[in-house]
Image: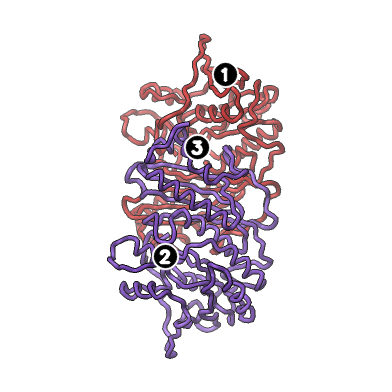
Chain colours: A purple, B red
Amino acid sequence: METLPEQITLAHGAGGKQTSALIHQIFERHFKNTLLTADDAAVLPRPEHQIAMSTDGFVVSPAFFPGGNIGELSICGTVNDLSCMGAKPLYLTCSFIIEEGLEVERLDQIAASMAETAEKVGAVLVAGDTKVVGKGQADQVFITTTGVGDVVSQNPLSGAKAAPGDAVLVTGDVGRHGCAVLLSRDEYGIDAQVESDCAPLWKPVSAALKAAPDLHVIRDATRGGVGTVLYEIAHQSHTGIRLKADAIPVDPSVAGVCGMLGLEPLYLACEGRMVMIVPQEEAQAVIDALAVLPDTQGICQIGEVTAEEPERVVMETEIGTQTYLPEPGTELLPRIC
Amino acid sequence: METLPEQITLAHGAGGKQTSALIHQIFERHFKNTLLTADDAAVLPRPEHQIAMSTDGFVVSPAFFPGGNIGELSICGTVNDLSCMGAKPLYLTCSFIIEEGLEVERLDQIAASMAETAEKVGAVLVAGDTKVVGKGQADQVFITTTGVGDVVSQNPLSGAKAAPGDAVLVTGDVGRHGCAVLLSRDEYGIDAQVESDCAPLWKPVSAALKAAPDLHVIRDATRGGVGTVLYEIAHQSHTGIRLKADAIPVDPSVAGVCGMLGLEPLYLACEGRMVMIVPQEEAQAVIDALAVLPDTQGICQIGEVTAEEPERVVMETEIGTQTYLPEPGTELLPRIC
C-alpha cells in the first residue's frame, strides 16, 4: 500500500494506486461499515416506507470555522433536509472535489467529523467519490452529500400546508452559523466569539413528530436564513406570516456583529435550526418536547400564520408598529454553506 | 420573476430571488416531473427490491467535448454505476458548483443534455442544489450526480465473483472518451476525429441479465479505463485475468493518437463501455443479445479469468509472448471525467 504524502496530488484523483491509498487510509478508515463496498454502487436494504432523497453541495469558506468544519456541515445539511420531510436518515453518499495541494491532515479531520456526525443520527456513509483538480481550479475542498431516508411521519409535511392560525416556531437562536463563518474570514477585524449552530437534527424532529402528529411544515433555515424560509413557506401556502420582533431569539454577540455590519440576523444562515409550523393547539407540546433536548433548548414561538397579507412576512415591533420583512434578494454572504 | 442575465453571478447561488429564477428558468424547465418539488427533499415511491445507491463527481475539462458534455457525462456515469449492480436507475439528484461568470446559455445546454440522457433510461431528476463560487474558485462547472436504483437482478453482481474459466467481455472499442477529451484540449496539435463513447447503458445491461442470469461481474470502465477495472476485479476475486492483445477493440484513430503520444488505450477512460465477466457457457448469449443494440454493437470477448497468476492481468500477444499489463499507478490524464 502506498503511503500518503502530506498533500493531495492529482494522482489521488486518477483512479489508480494513489486513489486506492487515499480511499483506504482516509475514507474507509473513518466510514467503515458493512454496506460500504468496493463495487460501483452500494446495495442496501429497502426502507420500510416511502423514501426521501435530497442532495446538497458544500463550498463554505473557510472550510474550518468556530463550531464546525465543512465535513460536519455537509452531513448536517443533508440529514436536516431529510428530517424536514419527516424522514429518518438512513444512507448517505459523499463526493469530494479536492484542490491539488490540500493537506491530507485536513482531509482526515473532515472525514472524521463526517463519520462522527452521521453516527449521531444513526445514518451510514454507503458510497463516495473523489476527484482532484489542479491548483487554482477549486478552493480547497467542495463536498456534495446526498441522503436517502425512510419517511416515518404519518402525515406528509410540506411548505404548502401552512394554514392561518398556525404557530411559527424556531428551534433556537438565529444567524449563528452565518455570523461564525463571517467572523472567521478575518476581513472585518471584529473580535467576537460566535460558534456555528451546526447540528444534525433528526432526533428533535422525531420528538416533534411524536408530540404533534399533525405538524404542518418543518424547514431548516440554511442559506438565506429564517427570513428566506418564511418567504418560501408564505409563497408555497399563499398565506401571510406575522412575526413578533421581540420574540426572535438572537445571541447578544450575533446581534452586536449584525448591528456593526448592518446585517439582519433573520437572513444569516443557520445550520442547526428548524422553522416548524404547527397548529396552535399543538405548539406547546412541541416546545415542551424539544426544550429538553441539547440542540433545541432555545425553541420558542416567533409568530403566526395569517390569512391577511398573503405571501408577505410582516414584522410587528414591541411598540405595535408593523413593517414588511424585505423579500430576500441579492446575496449578502456568498459561500456560507 | 427576475430575468436571467447572460452570465451566472454569485447572487444565483445565494438562495434568494436570483436563485429561484435560475431554478425555474433552467433546471425546472428541463427536469420537470411530478416528483420534483420545492420542499427540502423529494418523497418517492419505494422501489420493489433492494436499493442501489451511487454518487459521482464530474470535473471534466473542457466541459464540452466531441460526442458529449459534462451534463450528459454526469448522468451516464451514475446510471452506469447503478446498472453495474443490476439496478434499474430510478431517481437521480444533481448538485452544481458553478464558477461566477459561466454563460447561462452553456448551463442551459448542460441541463438539456442531462434531462435527455436521463429520459433515455427512464430515470427522473428528483432533487438538486446549486452553489456559485467566485471567479477563479472553481473551473466553470462541477456536477455531482447521485442515483438510486431498484436491484432487479436475481443474483448479486460483484467484482468478487469472477471465477477461473469465466469469459471477459467488453461492450465496444476502448479509450474513446479519454482520447476525445484529450484531443479537445488543443494542447497536442493532433488533427484526429474521435468522439466520446459516452452513453447510458441500462438497456444493454438489462438485456445481458436476461440472456445470462448467472452473470458474475459488470463494471463500467471509466476513470482508469479497462486496465484499471480488470486489476480491481483481479484483486477483489483473487484471480488472474489473461487478455488476448489482438482481441481488444480499439478504433484506428484512437490507436493512432495513442501511438503518437505513447498512451495505452486500456488505460484511457471510457464512459459508455462495460466490462462483463460471465461463465464461458453464457458468453455467446450475452454477445448475441448486445450486438444488436446501438451502444453495444462492438461487444466481444477479450480474454478469460484464470486460477494462475492471481491478482495479475496478463497480455498474450499474437505471436504467443506474454507480458504483465502494468498495474495502474500515477495519473495519465487528470480531469477526464
Q: Horizontal placement of A221 versus B89: left or right?
A: left
- A52 above or below A214? above
Quarter of the rendering occupied by the C terminus of chain B = top left
According to the image, label 3 marks what residue? B198
- A265 above or below A20? below
Give the number of marks.
Answer: 3
Q: Residue at x 69, y 57 (%)?
A: A49
According to the image, label 2 marks what residue? A195
Q: Is residue B170 visible?
A: no
Q: Nearer the viewer, residue A152 or A307?
A: A152
Going by the numbered disc 3, the residue's amino acid type is: Cys
Q: Secondary structure at mark 1?
A: loop
Q: Horizontal placement of A155 versus A56: left or right?
A: right
Going by the numbered disc 1, the residue's amino acid type is: Glu
Label 2–label 1 contact, CB within 8 A: no
Q: Secondary structure at mark 2?
A: loop
Distance, label 3 to label 1, CA atoms, is 33 Å
- A248 above or below B329? below
Chain to which mark 1 belongs:
B
Crowd class of label 2 (few under 14; some 14 to 19; many from 20; radius 10 Å)? some
According to the image, label 1 marks what residue? B309
